[in-house]
Amino acid sequence: MSSIQQKASLVWTYLLPKIPLLVGATVSHYTSGPLKPSWSYKFTITMAMAKAFAAHMDDVPLKHTQKMSQLNDKYAPVHQGAIATESSVPNSYRDKAAEYVDAILNQQGIDAARLGWDWKNDPHAEKPLKGEWTETKVKDDDFSQGRTILYLHGGGYMLCSIRTHRWATWHMARTSGARVFAVNYRLAPDSPFPAAVHDALSAYLYLLEPPADADFAPVDPKNIVIMGDSAGGGLTFATMLAIRDAGLPMPAGIVTWSPWIDLLCSMPSVIENTSTDYLPPDGFTHGGQSSLKKLAKIVLAADGVDDDTLLQSLPEVQHYTNNRLLHCKYVSPLLEDNLEGACPIMMIAGDAEMLRDEAIAFARKHVDAATPIQLSIYDDMPHVFQMFGFLPSARHSLRASGDFVKRVTIGGLGAENTTSLERVNVDGERRPLEDEANADWRERIGKLGGGPKYLAKL
């Protein structure tokens, strides 16, 4: 069977059972109207398909979902305007990065017993860390030699790869005039926290001081922007904090799309925006055993038990790490209290997505910090809407991301001096984020589901 026939077979195997769903979405769109004012019929159908696929993930064993993701790896194309070059990070960089990771974990009082596994002897780390360079074939006036993006893909820390995110690395190479280096960091649950941080830090050290036989010169940290989407956005924050806490040279900035920075699911949009996002309604919940509604019953029945004791008695909430570490700032960067020494930050999220409020809470928490934060919330948009390239908001946010990279790296104008929190409409027009948006973040932050007061409403 040819590759084209294989693709067609896979498409029909998935599409055929979805025909009733597509019919239902069509009828609803034209009778009741779209779920959000700007959603076209094309986008309504796209979202219905994405939502059905994501919901399916929690109905089957995780290994099955990971195998499905690997099929996407196999068929992910390289954009016709891009050059993609395979690369690998020698394990000597993991050895060096391990020293830094060990030191910062010790600072947090985190040892192997708290982690629940021997991260320093992970058999999955025996092979070199795979990466891929992406650049444009045609170097226009936006291209700057040495400007580099370290891209960390999303996928809940469990799925996807540098290939599934070629759409992102291509767009960022094009809009920022940079070379983009993406890495296949190790995935949970086989390699949970801190494996992903360890690999991301290894890649950063590789860019700073490549081996003599590398096909690129050492990159000035002032010319590096770390970037990621979803879990990759959370990993971007974690990597930036790890670099700072280890005393390493800071990158020029970070860019995050729909960052997952609160693995305690404490913010209201996780519940309120389930109808307008494609993420599973309860997240990736160990086959439903850790849905917020099930956890809420246990939490409410354990009235008066302190948070740490309660978390340790609950079923595991996330695949990425155990419950004892959900409060760790390298797992849930929303819980970081001090941005002193951090680099400029860009955060982009959709108003219709489930992770919206954690981005807002992070910006509000650090609104007076010396580190400038640019937060943009796009009207009507779901999680990582940049992947839907036919949307005007996707194109606008891609250009904005590229402009940020050009500003903060060498030769640019530099980051804005102040923090800005704004909304962006579908025409790209900006307006200030209203004060009442996510106003109760202070009392919810750091508590599973926002705490008993909010869990009782589920």
Image (cartoon, rainbow, N blue to C red):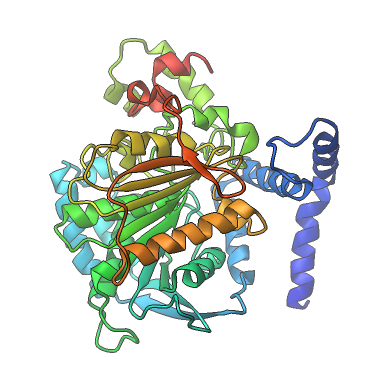
Q: Is residue 67 above or below residue 112?
A: below
**Residue at 61% across / 46% down in the picture?**
426
In front of the other: 26 or 320: 26
**Left or right of residue 20: residue 295:** left
In front of the other: 131 or 134: 134
Please tell me in which quadrant of the rendered image residue 395 appears: bottom right
Locate residue 57, reporting x and y percent.
61, 45
In front of the other: 231 or 351: 351
In front of the other: 199 or 168: 168
**Left or right of residue 64: residue 94:** left
Locate residue 391, reporting x and y percent.
65, 54
Q: Is residue 408 above or below residue 314?
A: below
* The N terminus lies in quadrant: bottom right
- Most extreme residue toward the bottom, as rendered? 213
**Residue at 31% across / 56% down in the picture?**
415
Please tell me in which quadrant of the rendered image residue 30 appears: top right
Number of marks in the image?
0
Q: Is residue 182 above or below residue 388?
A: below
**Left or right of residue 207: residue 20:** right
Please tell me in which quadrant of the rendered image residue 438 appears: top left
Locate residue 387, reporting x and y percent.
59, 57
Locate residue 58, reporting x and y percent.
59, 41
In this orientation, does residue 124 appear?
A: no
**Residue at 47% across / 23% down in the picture?**
295
**Left or right of residue 221: residue 18:** right
In this orientation, does residue 67 appear?
A: yes
* The C terminus lies in quadrant: top right
